[in-house]
C-alpha cells in the first residue's frame, strides 16, 4: 500500500462456519479507498460468504470487519456505509427506471428536492439518460444491470459490493460491461469489491485480487503479480494454463535454482524461500513465455534451455500450441500466428527456452522417490 492511502475495508482473522463446516477461515486483508478489489476463486471457496460479512448479511464467528476505520463486525447491514449488487438485479417491474433508482434514495430518506439531480447524475454515469420513463422489461440485460448499479450507487456508498454481477449476461455483453464497470468506478472513485470465479474478468478489471481456495486467501496481489508470480500451484493453475516441471535442485545461484540435464540443458527458476541443493521442487512457466527454435538454436545465456521432440501441434487461430517432450517432461509453447516460427511438424527436433524471470518455484513437489 502506498503512503497516504486510506483503508476502506479491513478484515482481520475473519472466519465463518455453517453447521460446523468452515466456509471462510482466517481471512485477513485490507482494501484501499477507491480500489477495484476482486475476490476470485472456484465455486464454494468462500467468496460470497466473505462479501456477505462485509455487507453485514452474515456475522463472523471470529475476527473483525472494520469499515472506514470503525469496527462494524456487529453493525446491521442497513447501517453500514456499503451497498450490494447481485447477479439477479431484481428491479421492480412495475416501476419506471427513474422510480427504480429513486427507491434507493427513499429508503435512505434523502430529501425529495435532491432526487432529480442525483438520479440524473447516476443515469448519466451509467449511460442511460433518456430512459427514465421506461419499464425494466423494455431494456436489454446489460441496461437492466446498469439500472441496478445506478440504484446501488445513488446513495453514494463508501463501497459497492458486487456478487458476480455479470453472471447472467452473454459473453459479448459481459466483456462490454467489464469495461463499462471499470469506467463507472473510475469516474466515481468508489471502492468496488467484486466477487467472480472468472479469472479473465478479475485480471482485466482489478487493481488487486485475492485468490481464494477452501475458505482461505492463497495469494493477494496485483493482476500482474498473480499471473506472473503465482505462489502456489493452485493459483498458478487457476489463473490460466501452465507448464509444471518436477525437478531436483543441483545448484543455487543468485536467487535462482538450477537443475542440470545432459548436454548443457538446464531448468532455471527464481526461488523465494530457501530450498536446499538436492531438494525436489515444482517449477511453473507459462506457455506464452516458452520460445521454440530448431534443435541447437541460440537461446538466452541465463535462462532455461531443453532439447526435445514435437509430440503434437494444435492450431487455435490466434496462436499455435506446440507440445514438446523434453528430459524434464512435456512442455507446451504458445506462439502467436504472426510470429516468424519455423513450420515444425510432429517428430521435429527442437530447442525450447525461456528467461529465468518467467519461471517460478510454486511449491515443494509431492514426489514419490
Ligand atoms: P459460488 O461461486 O458457488 O457462490 P463461493 O465461493 O461464493 O461459491 P460461498 O457461497 O461463500 O462460496 O460458500 C462457501 C461454502 O459455504 C460452501 O461450501 C457453501 O455450501 C457453504 N455455505 C454458504 N452459505 C451457507 C449457508 N447459509 N448455509 C450452509 N452452508 C453455506
Image (cartoon, helix red, strand yellow):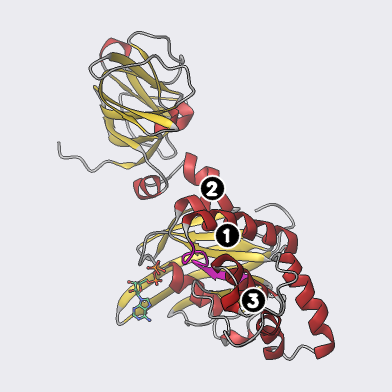
Write down the region rendered in magenta.
Answer: 160-169
Q: Mark 2 vs mark 1: which is more N-terminal?
A: 1
* Residue 32 vertical placement versus 56 (above, below): above
Q: CA distance from mark 3 to mark 2?
A: 26 Å
Q: Which callout, 3 or 2, points to the residue nearer the camera? A: 3
Identify the residue at image location x=54%, y=76%: 89
Q: Which residue is tagged 1?
A: 37
Give the image quarter of residue 68. Answer: bottom right
Q: Quadrant of ligand 1?
A: bottom left
- Disc 2: residue Cβ within 8 A of ligand 1's nearest atom: no
The residue located at (57%, 81%) in the rendering is: 91
Where residue 121 appears, x then y in whole percent? 78, 71
Q: Secondary structure at mark 1?
A: strand
Circle 3 packing at 10 Å, graded few (<14), some (14-19), many (20+), is many
Estimate the spatial distance between the alpha carbons at disc 2 and disc 1, rounded to whole Å. Answer: 10 Å
The residue at which mark 2 appears reads as: 223
Q: Nearer the viewer, residue 139 or 367?
A: 139
- Foreground residue, 3 or 82? 82
- Residue 61 - label: none
Residue at horizontal 35 percent and vertical 46 percent from the top: 233
Quarter of the figure with residue 304: top left
Residue 165 falls within the magenta-colored stretch: yes
Where 18 sits versus 248, above or below?
below
Badge 1: residue crowd in 10 Å (few <14, some 14–19, many ≥20): many
Amino acid at each position: 500500500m502506498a503512503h497516504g492511502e486510506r483503508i476502506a475495508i479491513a478484515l482481520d482473522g475473519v472466519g465463518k462456519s455453517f453447521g460446523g463446516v468452515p466456509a471462510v477461515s482466517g481471512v485477513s486483508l485490507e482494501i484501499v479507498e477507491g480500489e477495484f478489489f476482486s475476490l476470485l476463486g472456484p465455486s464454494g471457496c468462500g467468496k460470497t460468504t466473505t462479501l456477505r460479512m462485509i455487507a453485514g448479511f452474515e456475522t463472523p464467528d471470529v475476527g473483525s470487519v472494520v469499515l472506514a476505520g470503525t469496527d462494524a463486525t456487529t453493525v446491521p447491514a442497513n447501517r453500514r456505509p456499503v451497498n450490494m449488487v447481485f447477479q439477479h438485479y431484481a428491479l421492480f417491474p412495475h416501476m419506471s427506471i427513474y422510480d427504480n433508482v429513486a427507491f434507493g434514495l427513499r429508503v435512505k430518506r434523502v430529501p425529495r428536492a435532491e432526487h432529480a439531480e442525483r438520479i440524473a447524475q447516476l443515469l448519466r454515469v451509467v449511460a442511460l439518460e433518456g430512459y427514465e420513463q421506461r419499464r425494466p422489461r423494455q431494456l436489454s440485460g446489460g441496461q437492466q444491470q446498469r439500472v441496478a448499479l445506478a440504484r446501488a450507487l445513488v446513495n453514494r456508498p463508501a463501497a459497492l459490493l458486487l456478487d458476480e454481477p455479470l453472471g447472467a449476461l452473454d459473453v459479448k455483453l459481459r466483456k462490454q460491461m467489464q469495461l463499462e464497470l471499470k469506467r463507472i468506478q473510475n469516474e466515481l472513485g468508489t471502492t468496488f469489491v467484486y466477487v467472480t470465479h472468472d479469472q479473465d474478468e478479475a485480471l482485466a478489471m482489478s487493481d488487486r485480487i485475492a485468490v481464494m481456495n477452501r475458505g482461505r486467501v492463497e495469494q493477494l496481489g496485483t493482476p500482474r503479480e498473480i499471473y506472473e508470480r503465482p505462489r502456489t500451484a493452485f493459483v498458478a493453475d487457476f489463473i490460466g494454463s501452465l507448464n509444471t516441471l518436477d525437478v531436483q535442485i543441483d545448484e543455487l545461484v543468485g536467487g535462482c535454482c538450477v537443475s542440470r540435464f545432459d548436454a548443457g540443458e538446464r531448468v532455471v527458476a527464481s526461488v523465494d524461500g530457501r530450498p536446499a541443493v538436492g531438494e525436489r521442487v515444482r517449477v511453473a512457466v507459462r506457455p506464452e513465455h516458452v520460445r521454440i527454435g530448431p534443435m541447437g538454436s541460440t537461446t538466452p545465456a541465463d535462462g532455461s534451455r531443453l532439447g526435445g521432440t514435437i509430440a503434437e501441434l494444435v492450431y487455435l487461430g490466434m496462436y499455435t500450441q506446440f507440445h514438446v517432450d523434453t528430459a524434464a517432461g512435456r512442455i507446451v509453447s504458445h506462439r502467436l500466428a504472426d510470429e516468424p516460427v519455423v513450420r515444425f511438424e510432429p517428430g521435429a527436433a527442437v530447442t525450447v527456452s525461456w528467461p529465468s524471470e518467467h519461471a517460478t518455484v510454486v511449491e515443494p513437489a509431492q514426489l514419490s522417490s
